Amino acid sequence: MAKTISFNDLRKIKDSLPDGSIHRIADELGLSVETVRNYFGGQNFKDGKCCGVHIEPGPGGGIVVLDDTSIYERALQILEEKHPASKAPEA
């Protein structure tokens, strides 16, 4: 199921992840590190792949539609591990 959030919220989630999380997500989901970085707004399509992220201009850095939420959901799980008593950043 697709998820719609702002680009700024997506970047906030990425920036809140502990060091090494991008590599961890890539390993756990069988993706390249560059593909995971592209998911969060990176632009390296030589080494990484497009991953069902559609960005359109708008407030909050633009509107992002995530076709596949597996990377997003894994990032939220990692944030929950980091701060189990607090809530992960809202998206």
Image (cartoon, rainbow, N blue to C red):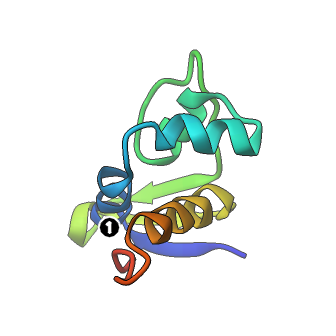
Q: Quadrant of the rendered structure where residue 32 is? A: top right
Image position, residue 47 (x, y; %): 59, 17
Picture coordinates of residue 38, whole percent (x, y)? 50, 38
Q: Residue at x 69, y 61 (%)?
A: 68
Say left or right for 31 vs 10: right
Relative to residue 6, is residue 90 depicted above or below?
Answer: below
Along the line of sight, the residue nearer the viewer: 70 or 49: 70
Decide: is 16 above or below 39: below
Q: Which residue ends up furthest to the right in the rendered image? A: 30
Within 10 Å of disc 1 (Cα), the crowding (few <14, some 14-19, many 20+) is some
Q: Which residue is mark 1?
A: 9
Most extreme residue toward the top is: 46
Q: Against 38, is 57 above or below?
A: below
Going 40% across and 60% down the picture, which residue do you hit? 56
* Quadrant of the rendering where the C terminus is positioned: bottom left
- Secondary structure of residue under mark 1: helix
Which three-letter amino acid code belongs to the residue tagged 1? Answer: Asp
Query: In the picture shown, does residue 54 fall above or below 37?
Result: below
Q: Quadrant of the N terminus?
A: bottom right
Q: From the viewer's side, name the closer residue of 44 and 26.
A: 26
Q: Is residue 45 left or right of residue 5?
A: right
- Residue at image location 71% in from the left, 35% down from the top: 31
